[in-house]
Image (spheres, grey):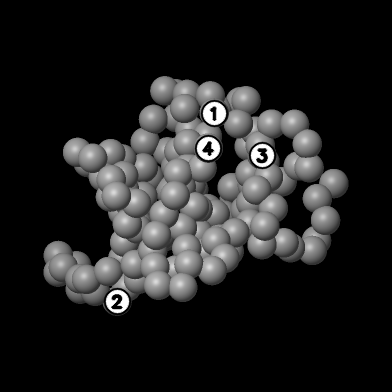
Amino acid sequence: MISCSTSHNIPSATTSGPRTIIIARDTISEIGVGGIKSWYCKDYITEGPILVELGYFGDPTFDGIGFILYDGGYSGEPTLHERNGLDHRWDWGSDSPNYSFVITPDGTGLYYDFSTVPKGEKTKPSAIYKCYQRK
């Protein structure tokens, strides 16, 4: 049973064994999805605690599916994931993709909020992060 309390440094929903994450109330084990490839991201200037983690699953059955975890924890939301050239991109949100996150090869993370941008218009990143691939 998972405790109701939260911790910002727990990398897994379980304390031992394979890493597990919770996506939209579903517990997902890295074993069942062919492994998890992910990047954790911190504030670009101060670094500080982990603010978000983005990733995708190793099993080709889950191609195009990714996730975002919030606040250094182990729970979050499903996303669409794609690789564009050398960049990784995640899109999510209820009204078409409202939000996007792009990680460039040098580890720069760019967060975009399209929720208030008129359809078809461009916007600049709302926030910039330093991202590190989880080993």
Marks 1/3: CA distance?
10 Å
Residue at point 63%, 57% (across, down): 73
User: How many angstroms separate mark 2 from mark 3 (CA)?
Assistant: 34 Å
Q: CA distance from mark 1 to mark 2?
A: 35 Å
Number of the label disc, if any, that sits on residue 116:
2
Q: Are marks 1 and 3 in contact (CB under 8 Å)?
A: no
Q: Nearer the viewer, mark 1 or mark 2?
A: 1
Along the line of sight, the residue nearer the viewer: 57 or 42: 42
Q: Which amino acid, mark 1?
A: Gly
Q: Callout 2, which amino acid?
A: Thr
Q: Point out which mark residue 35 bears.
A: 1
Label 4 or label 2, whichever lies nearer to me, is 4
Q: Which mark is residue 135?
A: 4
Q: Nearer the viewer, residue 83 or 15?
A: 15
- Label 4 SS: loop
Residue drawn at point x = 28 percent, y = 39 percent:
83
Vertical side of 102 occupied by 84: above or below: above
Q: Are marks 2 and 3 in contact (CB under 8 Å)?
A: no
The answer, for residue 26, to whether it is visible in the render is no
Q: Is residue 29 left or right of residue 44?
A: right
Q: Nearer the viewer, residue 96 or 80?
A: 80
Asked which quadrant contains residue 124, the reply is bottom left
Residue 31, visible in the rendered structure = yes
Q: Amino acid at mark 3?
A: Thr
According to the image, label 3 marks what residue?
Answer: 20
Q: Earlier in the sequence, mark 2 or mark 3?
A: 3
